[in-house]
Image (cartoon, rainbow, N blue to C red):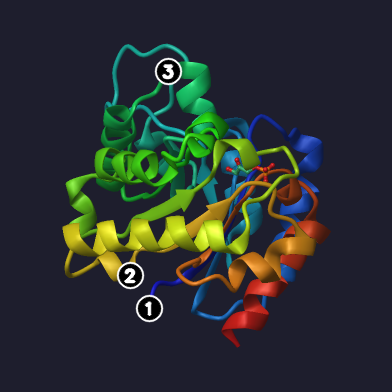
């Protein structure tokens, strides 16, 4: 069985004044069972302070992107080793906002995931179709191709997480139906199990896109959904903890 993972993605939100949210989340997950992992992926400027606040708690801290190279002349970029050094345990790669804003490709996402693994981080590899791709019936093809291209071969032996985030559901308040989510997650699971016979069934598959306290229980109950990657609703401790509670309810 894959672990359940409830991960927040703060995106380009969060100042020092918002660090109290991290303390509140850390306190709120003190009863977190072994079967659930809870983390917040913070802007790079807050990773070190966030990791310090979360230290000794069940809350883990992640970054939101890393460069594929270990180090070098890459002004403005951050390496996986830097994130690990600051106390991160995870890093998001291949998020659709990175793909759209910075032209990142499947090949880059796979290389970044590889760099993350080399630095001892668990990559959260994001995939998802646009509305046009869904409307033209290509969702499954697009997502399985992204999975094939963005998940590195190292996933055969090292933990990774995959997040299905339909681009049209991110920040829009729209979510796919449980049937639509189940269809895509099943296709991802089959693809991973075929490619990685030993580990494919253990890779947590997260759903992301307008997940909130009001829909979390329904989404988390879908087959092959092993957790969530939560944007807007992770900025408020109360909302994020309500989603965590929905997951804890289902695994207890
Ligand atoms: P929202 O939850 O704000 O839709 O964002 C989802 C997301 O992109 C998480 O990575």
Would you identify the image quadrant in which residue 212 lies? bottom right
Q: Residue at the spot x=61%, y=31% of the render?
A: 45
Q: Is residue 57 visible?
A: no
Instruction: Tell me the SS state at disc 3.
Output: loop
Label number found at residue 202: 2
The numbered mark at residue 103 is 3
Marks 1,2: beta carbons within 8 A? yes
- Badge 1 crowding class, 10 Å Cα cut-off, few under 14, some 14 to 19, many 20 or more, is few
Q: Quadrant of the C terminus?
A: bottom right
Q: Earlier in the sequence, mark 1 or mark 3?
A: 1
Q: x%, y% of residue 139? A: 44, 42
Secondary structure at badge 1 equals loop
Q: Is mark 3 within 8 Å of ligand 1?
A: no
Q: For marks 1 and 2, give the CA distance.
A: 6 Å
Q: CA distance from mark 1 to mark 3?
A: 34 Å
User: Where in the figure is residue 196, as x and y percent of width and height?
Assistant: 19, 61
Ligand 1 within 8 Å of disc 1? The answer is: no
């Amino acid at each position: 069985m894959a672990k359940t993972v409830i991960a927040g993605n703060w995106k380009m939100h969060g100042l020092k004044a918002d660090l109290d949210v991290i303390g509140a989340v850390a306190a709120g997950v003190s009863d977190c069972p072994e079967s659930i992992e809870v983390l917040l992926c913070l802007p790079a400027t807050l990773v070190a302070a966030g990791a310090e606040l979360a230290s000794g708690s069940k809350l883990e801290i992640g970054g939101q992107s890393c460069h594929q190279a270990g180090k070098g002349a890459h002004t403005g970029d951050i390496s996986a080793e830097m994130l690990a050094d600051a106390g991160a345990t995870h890093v998001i790669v291949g998020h659709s906002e990175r793909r759209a804003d910075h032209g990142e490709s499947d090949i880059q996402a796979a290389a970044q995931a590889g760099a993350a693994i080399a630095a001892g981080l668990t990559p959260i590899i994001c995939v998802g179709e646009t509305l046009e791709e869904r409307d033209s019936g290509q969702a499954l093809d697009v997502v399985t191709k992204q999975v094939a291209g963005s998940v590195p071969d190292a996933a055969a032996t090292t933990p990774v997480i995959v997040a299905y985030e339909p681009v049209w559901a991110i920040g829009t308040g729209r979510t796919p139906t449980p049937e639509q989510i189940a269809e895509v997650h099943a296709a991802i699971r089959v693809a991973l199990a075929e490619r990685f016979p030993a580990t494919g069934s253990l890779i947590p598959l997260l759903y992301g896109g307008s997940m909130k306290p009001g829909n979390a229980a329904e989404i988390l109950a879908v087959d092959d959904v092993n957790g969530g990657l939560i944007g807007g609703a992770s900025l408020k401790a109360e909302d994020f903890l309500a989603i965590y509670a929905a997951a804890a309810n289902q695994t207890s």
